[in-house]
Image (cartoon, rainbow, N blue to C red):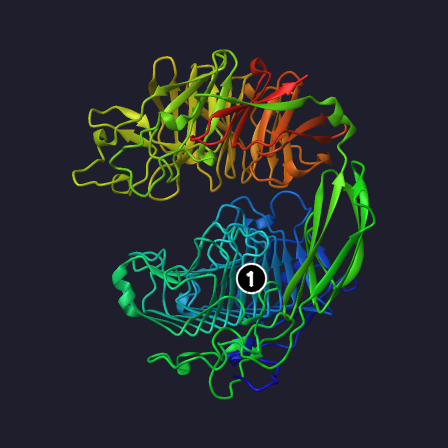
Amino acid sequence: MSCCTSFKMTVLATSALMSFGVFGQNILKVGPEQSLKLPSEAAAIAQNGDIIEIEAAKYSCDAGVKWKANDLVIRGVNGRAHITWQDCGGNLPGGKGLWNTIGYNVRIENIEFSFAKVSDNNGAGIRHDGGGNLVIKNSYFHHNQNGILVTPYTPKYPVENNHVFIVDSEFAFNGHNSGRSHNMYITNTNTFSIFNSYSHDADTGHLIKTIARENYIIGNKLEDGLTGTSSYHIDITGGGPTFIHGNVLVQTQNSPNYVMVAYAAESKEGSRNNPNKHLFMSHNTIVNYHDRGKFLKIYDNMNDFEEGYVANNLVYGLSEANFVTFSKSATSNLVSIQNNIITDGSDFESLENESYYLAKHSVAIDAAIDVEGFELSKFKHQLTEFNRSGPANIRLIDGKLDVGAFEYDGLIHPVPSVELIANQTTIDYLGSVELAWTAQNAHVCDFSGGLDKRVSASGSLHVDELSRNTDFILTCYGDAGKNQSIVSINVNESPKADLLPETTVDTLLNTRISDYLTSNDPYVSGVMKYWPGGTISSVYVPEKNVVYINGGGMRTYFGNELFAFDVTTQTLQQIHQRTDITQLDIFEAGDNNYWDVFNYPCSGIWTTVSGEMTAAPRNLKNSLTFDYKTDSLFFQGGYVACSSNYETSDGWLFAPDTGEWTLLHAENSDFKGTTSRIVTLDKVSGLQIIAHNQGLHVYNAETAESRKLVNSVHTAGVSGIIDEASNTLFYIGNGRVISTSLDGLATAEALSFKTDWQIIGDDYLLNSGSPKLTYHTEAEKIVGWNGQDRLYYLYIDHENSTIEIVAKNTPELNGSRFEYIQALGGYLVIDDSRSNFSLLREVQ
């Protein structure tokens, strides 16, 4: 237990944290009233040892800034400087980050970084390719694809000389729903240390991902937050000495990955394998709301785990059985698990309001024990407590330590209260509202839902042009947790919506794909036996009145079946049987499951022992097309089914009438980008259009010839659709709309994109990832769907460069694919292989 007062730390840890190198006295000032208006102007002239002071202001679209000098200090003054790519359009220049630090030693203080976006989904607030010490202090990273991405260039900056220190900073809402980008991602680094920082609400990625050789994670708060889509809270990817102490970790019910901390999950021979696998975890407060939740999983892929200590943690929502788990049971003998207190929540001041300070009656007070082999002398840094409002508190001890992340201090920590009001809660389409709020016992507040904005604890603002029902959520943070207030605004539909048809839902019986999939395959082990919705692709061929369907791939399903839905009879037929893997030339005696057969190398080409070639199972990412020149289905690339998510670039034709596969080409670098490709068919020229971030090609499947017309297309989170009325190709999603005319495509040598579309109305479709799109041949409009309860009709005005998106409510229905089929009088909806198809039928 501590004494009843504590003092603030003015300096954290060691002198290495806050100073390095030899700094000069040259100060470069940046700001609206300075001679240097933008950070990029200072970066262009900065010399070794300079100090750059950036006035608090919003610096929009000044991105891809390269800081090349060594021993730099860059800090916001008179408030926090804000670097953002929001509303700048397209990808930020340089393809890396808002800032790209490439020198030796850099310290960044009091800067906000937001909305970094590049084509490979790794756009970072800071991309650090330099070496030495990187220090981040009192900074805020939000809504970037990666908050910070540390990738020192090791030929110049050897790993052993690189260190990352993060203190008093916040990381929120970073990631790109793929699970491969994170709030922070640390590589090529000797030591990684993070203190008194708040990482939360990552978009599908991890709150902390580090491959550093040593890790010190001390006195932070890590939580899924309201959105609950964070994966691991802490991913110690390759193992190595790791100290996790005094942190608060909170996992919600909606988290897609129920393990909070993973140790050495990706450690393997020759890759991401750090030696000296020692793990020390103590005095953390762990709160779990996930019904399958686990705190820690230790992987011992290399059989080289040495020791672990998990002690003196305060735990809510977990049992002893799911507290610590192991990939190999023998590893448990190397881990000491002692004196972890499981609480029903009464040990906290307020579990409901996330005030995890100890209550005065808590059994955790003075309850810590000394663990043999686990002394404080093992730490390189002092034990600290998380403090949301400023520098960390030193953990003061007057005898025995308490269990959990906080020492009892005898104080009452008031929970924030917040009130948010609107001047009206029902408005007309494209109307506006006034919001006002007041919070007590709070330091800062964040809007989410209909608005992404950080605000002070009291204020007001005006919101224009609301086009759909919107919840404004205001969350305010104080010393003792957080609280929130929600205002719901009901928005009347557009007058144009009254002119659009209503819809009803019909279930099409006997259309479950899973009824045709082999469920008793002896080689299925640890893989899915069905097609998840995200792996299904389909294409409607009006001339045949048939919808062709494929699915699986991407480590989910290992069969390459194909199906046809006859629109006239509304029946499903299997047109290609699954290839028997025991007849493949890569099959070996002793293979027990698919992982054994398809481990390495991953390939899109299957060859049988008789020499016949077929396409391996793949997730085409909604890029299945029909080729009229050859009367065949066209397959280009896709994520193939193997033990890793590998995207191939081979090309195939499949003739539905004969059941024959034709290999057009094997792996082809022209069609291999670092983002998923999008394939569309231009019916006028009969050419396939293949686009990804490395270029756009047109492909003649009849001759297997291609030509490149565009150097790069941003395809991450984007869907392609052709507006047949104007013969215009649109790429829509992930916050952007671009288009190009396909007139004269057969002989075109280049294409140019129109990027200046003005969007009017409901922009949900525009801002969603890989939106579901189809072409309504009767209405002659592109139509989108949110996969649940709304259609979006696009009114395209080429002359005035405007697109009005009008939403129309529908009955609730889940689906991953939808196709407008005039002969059905509506939209064919496919969810996953275990569900019958549905018809979202128009009612005139």
Q: Is residue 120 visible?
A: yes
The kind of residue tagged 1 is: Ser
**How many discs appear?**
1
* Residue 738 on image: x %, y %: 64, 34
- Horizontal placement of 595 versus 631: left or right? left
Q: Is residue 723 visible?
A: no
Q: Nearer the viewer, residue 351 or 243?
A: 351
* Residue 721 on image: x %, y %: 58, 27
| Quadrant into which the C terminus falls | top right
* Residue 227 on image: x %, y %: 58, 51
Question: Residue at 52% across / 83% down in the picture?
Answer: 1
Identity of the residue furthest to the right in this view? 423
Q: Is residue 501 above or below residue 392?
A: above
Q: Is residue 721 above or below residue 590?
A: above
Identity of the residue furthest to the left in this view? 589
Q: Nearer the viewer, residue 440 or 151?
A: 440
Dividing the picture into quarters, in which one does residue 244 lie? Answer: bottom left
- Look at mark 1 in the image and give the residue it sits on: 199
- Horizontal placement of 332 versus 396: left or right? left
Question: Residue at 47% across / 28% down in the picture?
Answer: 537
Mark 1 closeness class: few <14, some 14–19, many ≥20 residues within 10 Å: many
* Residue 361 on image: x %, y %: 55, 77
Identity of the residue furthest to the bottom in this view? 398
Mark 1 secondary-structure assignment: strand
Question: Residue at 43% across / 70% down in the picture?
Answer: 161
